Image: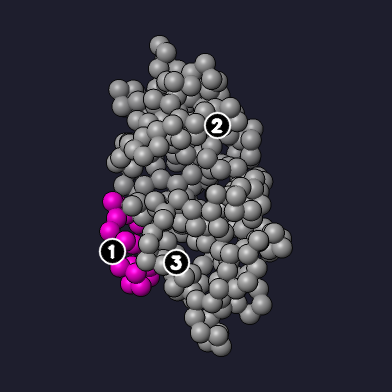
Amino acid sequence: MGTTAVHAAPPGNGRGSVRVLGRDDLAATVALLSANPIENVFVAARVRSSGLDQTGLGCPLWGYERDGGLRALFHAGSNLVPVNADADAIDAWARVAGRHRACASIIGPSGVAMALWRRLGELWGSDWTEVRNIRPRQPVMSIDHDPAVPFNPDVHRISLEHWDPYYEAAVKMYTEEVGVSPLQGNPAGYRFYVRQLITSGRAFGLVHRGRVVFKADLGSVSGNVCQVQGVWLDPAMRGRGLAAPAMAAAVRLARTVAPVVTLYVNDFNLPARATYARVGFRDVGEFATVHY
């Protein structure tokens, strides 16, 4: 377990240091994550599941320390996710990140994620600056009560009986949202990921004539908060008033797992934002995503 500080700036400059966190840092890490449970649900869920063991997490969790305390975190996996990072923390971690990018995206509070992306580019150049797309404004929304509209009772937890059609819908959703297929590189891995969502009871859908025409799943769960992701309605079914009742049903199911349901959405996706607002979600923050 890493416990030796890796300094990102000369000692004595007052800007702190960064290091890979280990088992002894768990209590301080949980306390930092708990300060904003909605914003931090992705990292908190991973820490809740795997602790700070790199084998379980699949990546290191870096900590930024200043004045004797843990001030910020950087989840450095396929998703690079900053937590509670100010300008000094961003600069410190960016300096040790290196020229060669390993992540596929940077995700976090809008100002922080964009500042981290810019600083990495300033220090290390094209491997960090050349991107597939940037979503600088993604409203974070949440709901902690029953939906404000009637729900569609046909939306239910998906079982392995519908693994194949749910997987097909998941591929369509991802491709439509991100602009590339999730099957590039590791199709077996994505299929296994969808299976895990189903077997854990976190995949919700509406099946029509053997096809999944609406889907949503829980990507992260930590304490009282769960994060909905992968919301998709078959394009042929759009414009018929189906989205809000289907989403209301997904919220009801999600709240049996955790009472506070959150998600984030692209600011330009006005139909989705309107649907979530009708269901009862309210804006609580803003994320940004950089896709490589």
Q: Residue at x 28, y 51 (%)?
A: 132
Front residue of 115/105: it is 105
Q: At label 1, which amino acid type do we have?
A: Ser
Q: Does residue 98 appear in the picture of this structure?
A: yes
Q: Secondary structure at mark 1?
A: helix
Residue 140 locus on image (x, y percent): 47, 50
Q: Residue at x 36, y 55 (%)?
A: 290
The span from disc 2 to disc 3 (Cα, nearest Å) is 31 Å
Residue where numbered disc 1 is placed:
126
Residue where numbered disc 3 is placed:
97
Decide whether residue 131 is among the magenta residues.
yes
**Segment colored magenta:** 118-137
Whether residue 233 is situated above or below residue 137 in the rendered picture: above
Q: Secondary structure at mark 3?
A: helix
Whether residue 234 is situated above or below residue 66 in the rendered picture: above
Residue 230 locus on image (x, y percent): 44, 36
Whether residue 42 is situated above or below residue 253 in the rendered picture: below
Q: Residue at x 45, y 17 (%)?
A: 207
Give the crowd class for mark 1: few <14, some 14-19, many >=20 residues within 10 Å.
some
Q: Which numbered disc, 1 or 2, marks the residue that appears first in the sequence?
A: 1
Q: Does residue 216 appear in the picture of this structure?
A: no
Q: At label 2, which amino acid type do we have?
A: Gln
